[in-house]
Amino acid sequence: MIPEDFQEIISNMTENAREGLQRAEFTSREFNTGYIGTEHILLGLLSVKSSLAAQAAGEVGLTFTSLHKYLSENPIPSKNVPEFTNPNVKALSESAVFTLRMSWEISQEFQQEHLGTEHILYAILQQNKSRTSQIIAELGIDTKTLLSKLEDMFARDEQAEATDKHTSKQQTSRTMTILNRFGEDLTAKARNGEIDKIVSRKKEVKRLITVLLRRTKSNPVLIGEAGVGKTAVVELLAQKIVAEDVPPQLLDKKVYEIDLALMLSGTKYRGEFEERLKNVIKALEKHQDVIAFIDEIHLLTGTGAAEGAMDAANILKPALARGKVRLIGATTFDEFKKSIEKDSALDRRFQPVRVDEPTSAETLEILKGLRPGYEAHHHVKISDETLKETVFMADRYVFDRFMPDKAIDILDESAALLSSEKTKKPGQAREIMREIELLNDKQTEAVNAEDYERAALYKTRISQMQKKLDEEERVAKDCKPLVLNSDYIARAISSRTGIPVEKISHSEAKILQNLEKYLGKKIIGQKEAVEKVSRAIRRNKSGISAGTRPIGSFIFLGPTGVGKTELARVLASEVFGSQKALIKIDMSEFSEKHKTAQLLGAPAGYVGYEDGGTLTEKIRRQPYSVVLFDEIEKAHPDTFNLLLQLLEDGELTDSKGRKVSFKNSIIILTSNLGANEMMKESALGFEVNDQKEQSLAEIHTKNEKFARRDLEKMLRPELLNRFDGIITFEALTKTEISKIFDNLIKDLNDRLIHQGLHIKVKQSAKKLLIDKGFDAKNGARPLRRTIEDQLEHKIAEGILSGEFHRGLQLVASVNNNEIVVSPIKE
C-alpha cells in the first residue's frame, strides 16, 4: 500500500514518469535486490527514451546502457542494503521515498502541473552524498552540467510564452505517446501492407463513412455475430483512407485500435484505469484527426467499476456527448442487447451498423482476395475450384461458427496440413550452408594466422560448396508447387467436426442420385416411404422448388417399431454426413400452452431467456439438419401455428428477434395415429402374427385409412397441404424382420470390434430368435430387445467373467430350445 500523500503524487505523474517507476520495479527484480532504490528509479527513467530525463541525461553521456553495465558489474554489498523503516512502503527504500517526495516539491516550486521524469532526475542529483550520485560521478558524468541543463529547462517553462509552446509541444508528444501505448495505428499498417486485401463489405463501409461524417452522434457501432468480419470493415476503412478513396473530410484521418486489455494490464491502484482512460479521451479530443476503434466495446460497461467509482462507459459518455471524439465500436447482437441497449444514455450516442454473415458467393470473393497471402505463407497453389469446395464444405459441415471466419479457418488448416505432409525437408541444402559457414570461419582463422596457402585451399572448397548450394536451390525452385485439393479440405473438416472423411468427400449429386439405394440398405420393408422421401429431396435440392422452404417436409404415420424414427436418423447420416445432424424434439414435452414458447425461447424476463429456443438455437448453430418432431399428436395445438409458418416461409423468429432459416433442413413429423384402431381390428379376429403377406397388405390399407382420418381431425388442411409427403409405414413381415435381424447382428459385431470379438449366429439360433422377437403389432423393437436379452447379455457376462477374451470367434447356437453363446473350437 502507498502512503496517502503518495496518491496525489502518483495521480499527478506523467505517463513517462509512471512507466519509469514500473520499469524500476522490473529492474530491482532483475538484480534481485529485494527493494526499489534510487539507482533502480534512475535506470527506469533512462530506459524510457522519450522522457525528458533520458534526453537531458543522454546529452552529458548518462545512458541506460552505461548505468546498467555498472550496476551489473558492481553489485551492492549486503551490509549496504537499506532497511525499511516505513511499513507501508515495502518495495521502496527510504531514499527512494524521500526522492519522490522531493521531486513532487520541486515540481510545485517550479509551478508545474505534472510531476515529470525531469523533476525526479533533478531530485536524485540534488542528493550529492547518496550512493546513486556517487555512481553517476564514477561514470564520469558532470553532475553540475546536468543540473544546469535541467534548471534551464525549468526556467524556460517559467516564461509564459515559452511555457505555452513547451506545454503544447510536450502535451502533443505525450498524448500521441498514450495513443501509441494503448493503441495501434491501422492506417499505418494498411500503408505498410500489413493488412490483408479486403473485398466485399462495400455496403457496410459506406454506411460506416456516412455515420462518421455526421455532425452529431458520429459514433458507429458494428453489430454482428462473431467471425462475420466486423474488424475487417474497419480495416477496409483504413485501406480506403490510405488509398484516398474516401470523402475529403476523412482524407487525413488515422484509425487507432484501442486495446482495453492493455489499458487494464498493470493497473495496481484504485483509479489507475480511469486515469488512463481519461488520458486517452483527452488525447482523442486533442487529435481530431484520430478515429478510435474499440473491439468488444461492450466490455466498457462494468470495466473499472469498484465501490465508489464509475465504470468506463460512464467516463466515456460525456466525451461522446460533446462530439469531440469519433469512436467506432464492435460487438455481437447478444452483447449489444445485454450491455449497451439497456443503457439508454450510452445507446443513443451510438449509431448501429449491422454486419450480417456474408453469403456463400461473397465468402468466395473474400477467399479469392486472401488467396495470395495463404499461397505465399504455405507455399501451395489454391485453385478457384478448391475455394468453392472450401466454402461449400465449411457451410455444410461446420455449424458452430460463421462465414467467412470458418471458411478462412478451414482453408488455412487444410493448406497447413498439405504443407506439413508434402514439403520436402531442406536437409541437404542446410547441411551445405552449415559447411560453408564452417569453412568461412576456418579461412578467417588461416588468414589471421598468416597461413595463406591453407586459406586458399579453404577458398577453393567454399567455391565448390557454393556451386552445390546453387544447384540445390535451382532444383528446389524448379519443383512444382504443391496443389491444395478437396481431399485436404475434407480432412481438415473431419479433424474439426469428427465427421468421417468418406462422408465429407462424397459429392452431393452422387448421394442424391443413389439415395434410395443408401436408405434401402438400412430401412427394411418401407420401399414406398424411401422412394417418396428420396424423390422429394432430389426435387427440392435440384433448385426447382422455392428456395426459402425446407429441403423436404414429411409426416410419417404407422404403428410403432416400423422404422419412422430410424429413417430420420439414416437421412441425417446419408444427406448431412452424420447422425449428429438429427435434432429430435419430443413433442410430449410441449403438451401445455406455455411450453410451446420454449421452442422459440422464453420471453424476456422469464427463466431461460438467455439460453435461446429449444428449436431455433439448435438450428441457428446447425442449419444442415433433420428436425424430427416425435409424436406430434401429443403437442399443444399452438405448436401447429409455428409449423405453418416454418413450412411456408422457411424461417422462424426467436424470442430475441433473430430470424432463423430452415431452408437447409429436412422437417419430419412422426405419429402413431390410427394404431389404436389397428389393435381393435386385431382384437376382433385379425391376429396379425398369423396372417400371410396378403392379409398384412389389407391391414396396411386399413391402418393408412385410420391414420389419415385421425390426422385430418388433428391438423388443419392448410398445414397438411404444405407437406411434401404424408407417408404411412407398412407393418413388417417375417421376411423383413429376418433382414432387420441381419442388420442388428452386423451392428452388434461393429460394437464388438472394440472388445476384439466377433459372433456368428447359426441358422437354428436365428430362427429361434426371430420367432421369439417377432411381433407385427410392435415391429422391430421386440426383436431388438430379444437380441439384447439372448445374445448381448450373455456376451457381457462372458467378458466380465474372463471366459471371452480378445481374439475369440463366438457362435450362437441352440441347445434344448435355449440360445447358447460359446467360443468356436479350433
Image: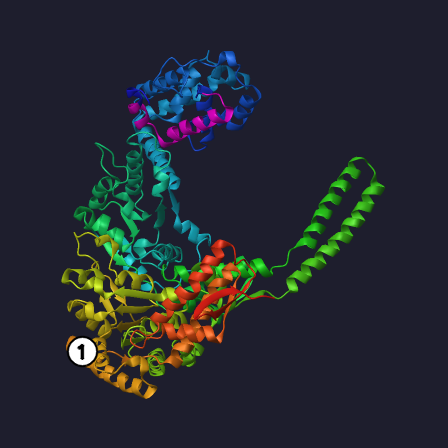
| Quadrant of image for the N terminus | top left
Residue with the mark numbered 1: 710
In percent of width and height, residue 681 lies at 21, 81
Percent coordinates x, y for residue 626 in the rendering: 33, 69
Q: Is residue 714 above or below residue 414?
A: below
Q: Residue at x 45, y 68 (%)?
A: 819
Q: Name the residue nearer the viewer: 11 or 766.
A: 766
Position of residue 114 measured from the top left corner of the image (x, y, whole percent):
32, 27
Per the image, label 1 sits on a secondary structure element best described as: helix
Front position in the image: 237 or 479: 479
Residue 623 lies, with reference to residue 716, above or below; the image says above
Q: Is residue 26 magenta?
A: yes
Of helix, strand and loop, which mostly describes the magenta segment?
helix
At a point 28% along the width and 60% down the height, the residue shown is: 617
Between 473 and 705, the residue placed more toward the observer is: 705
Magenta segment: 7-34
Q: Is residue 746 visible?
A: yes
778 with respect to 480 (left or right): left
